[in-house]
Amino acid sequence: MNKKYGDREKDFPLPQILSGFLGFIFGEEFGRNLFEGEFWKKGSKGAMLAENLPSEQKKILNLLSAAEIQRTAGSYDSLKKTCSLILALLKDYIPRNLDQKRRNIFLYRLSLSLLSGVGDFLAGKGLFAEALKFYQELFALYPGDFAVVRKMARTFYTMGPNYLSEAEKLYRQALADHPDDLEIAENLGRVLNVSPGGLDEARIVYRDALLHCRTDMDRLRFYARLLELSPGDGDILLRMGRLYRRQGMFIEAKHFLEKAKDLHSDPWEALDLAYLYYLLNDFRKAEALISALTGGAGEAYLSSRYLLGLIREGEERWEQASEYFEEIPPESSYYWRAQAGLARVYLYQGNYLQAESLARMIAPEQHANLGTDFLELCEMLENALQRECYFKAEEWREHVSESVPSFHLKKAVHKRSMGPNFWRKYEAFEVIGNGPAGQILLGRERQKGYKVAIKYLPGDLLEDPLIVRRMQGILKSWRNMEENNSFIVRVYEDCFFEDSFFYAMEYMERNLASVIKTWAPAPTEIVTGIAVQICDALAYYYRYNGGIAHGALKPENILFSINDELKISGFDFFWVLEGKKVFSTKEVKKHAFLARNLSYSAPERLKEKSFFHNIRPGRFNNDQNIEMAFEGIDQRADFYSLGVILFELATGFLPFDIQSRKSLFSFQKAKTRFISHFNKTFLHPELTKIIKTLMARDPAGRFSTPAEVKEAIQTIQKRIKTS
């Protein structure tokens, strides 16, 4: 791939940006000459061909030449008219053998790439009024398009106070149609915030948005907006502090809880802060806050007694810790926590039998409520009894196995997690992406200051500790790869805290999905360039990961740095959830939120099979993972995914039309790999052959290694250079 394609997007040369679309219409050679600028090079083969082109192609070339002159000269009104004329002409030239639905999609993508692309180019130069004209032209063609409405509203907002009413009108319209769109709600609130008399309405918008928040990170986002409008609101400060504490972000929690404490004298707020000080090992501050509380009755008082017990335990003052824990009566919500604390104190004092007796008294329904406290108590008791008497330790282990399902697995999960220490190293700023399996946060390493992307998986996906353990295993394997490689996104530490999972990774500017959105149908040069880089990344991945298939190759997991360097990321989330590579329609239905992943999954993964299916001599590399082989899955499943990706990049379409899970399964069982009525002239014939091989239904018909795919792709590149 030409490493400067990102720069081309910024400069927005119309002939190159549209070369893939025009290659789709007029043939691959036309698009390639347009991409390389051959039609305007004197004495070149392309220039000589241009003289003999059909009249409709000559018209398009003349219009593109005029558009480039107008763009560079700053004649943007004339440029808009020329763009409209190009669209009108191309509408009639779209191949007739493309069905109406895909014709409409193609024309929409073409209009978006041209008009919205020019608008984005002008907005990037600060020419917002000129950019708006192109967005409005596109809106006239597609009046219900949500993306265009957002661009227009953002442009009005950027143009200053005189245009705020227009921005507000558009954002309100968009929010009415999409009430759960948090980005629209946030933008509308910003507009109202700077509009005369709009503060109260902004508060209403932000509070309404809180009703649609699905994660704590989203809630923190809107509480932060509300706090900007009401800096002295102690209730908001308290809520933010508690949310941060629940995520294990103690540094941020401390900041907000201290501010809330300064504004109120509520004992529960003081206790919240005191408990946080305890978690941060600042026992002196925690005790000072508790001592300042007055009154000796009620649940708040019992909470303070329990907290003092924890502090004395941390100070190794065992007798005083016992006294505080023993003060908590059975009717208190802190009773069982206090009993666990008392059992720990007995262990520290060497009273193992008393500790065991007390631990056995803790009701099974309380185990989940105690969380890691109970896991730590069980482990401490097991280690203590092991030193005292092997048989006693064995009896305790049997009791734990019966009363605490998956105890040893849960213990392993917590041992392998950084816990709150993760947030002492990293901080999160904002949500920058939402996916089916969680959110992506923009963050920073606190000491060195470099950017990180932090993946956040909410607790509803992590109810089974085996899922968390698989996640940890995958992330460890990624970390074990060479740190300074050029092909794999680096993965840093992970954190499992209060049933939420976070892990930090290298921050990348964008992914292949955004490239497809901008370029597809992309010229052959871009398709082959990206394909070679993916092959290099896969070769590295297999070499350092035991030959195991990636399993989740899709545009969102192929990332680009600011210098257009490609790296692969992600992992097979279906395997994380189910523990296997092959799944049935029932399992697909169970995890419907991952449906997009199925669009890139190989056929051998989408139907039930018995063990040893597809295992015949010569079908697998020597280093192929045996477990995958039992399920009939190897690296060639990734090559199928690569074929779908290259087809989508080259055409702008997936090679099938998904109406439902049933239709996807039907496609995977079909013999054909392409939409049969596609116009074949827009794809380079050798590229078509490679994609067909990659997408062969039978894995035996595909390439065997990334090196084979790369060699075939490079053959196309050489022919293009010499043609």
Image (cartoon, rainbow, N blue to C red):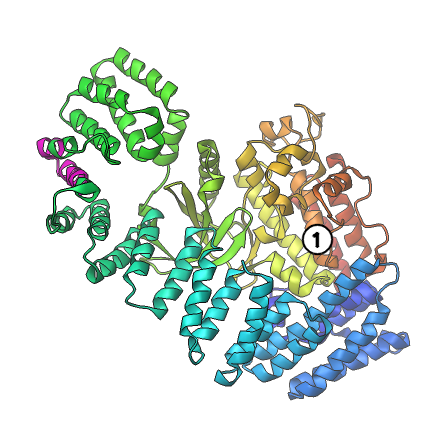
Q: Quadrant of the C terminus?
A: bottom right
Q: Residue at x 25, y 31 (%)?
A: 336
Side of 165 where 43 appears, left or right? right
Is residue 318 shown above or below 252? above
Asked if residue 228 lies in the magenta stretch, the reply is no
Residue 416 position in % (x across, y down): 37, 36
Is residue 299 shown above or below 337? below
Is residue 583 in sight in this rendering? no
Q: Considering depth in this image, is 170 or 583 the residue closer to the camera? A: 170
Identified by mark 1, the residue type is Leu
Q: Quadrant of the N terminus?
A: bottom right
Q: Residue at x 63, y 26 (%)?
A: 630
Residue 471 position in % (x across, y down): 47, 38
Question: On the image, numbered disc 1 is attached to which residue?
Answer: 646
Side of 292 where 609 appears, left or right? right
Label 1, residues with CA under 10 Å away: few <14, some 14-19, many ≥20: many
Residue range highlighted in magenta: 303-322
Asked if residue 320 lies in the magenta stretch, the reply is yes
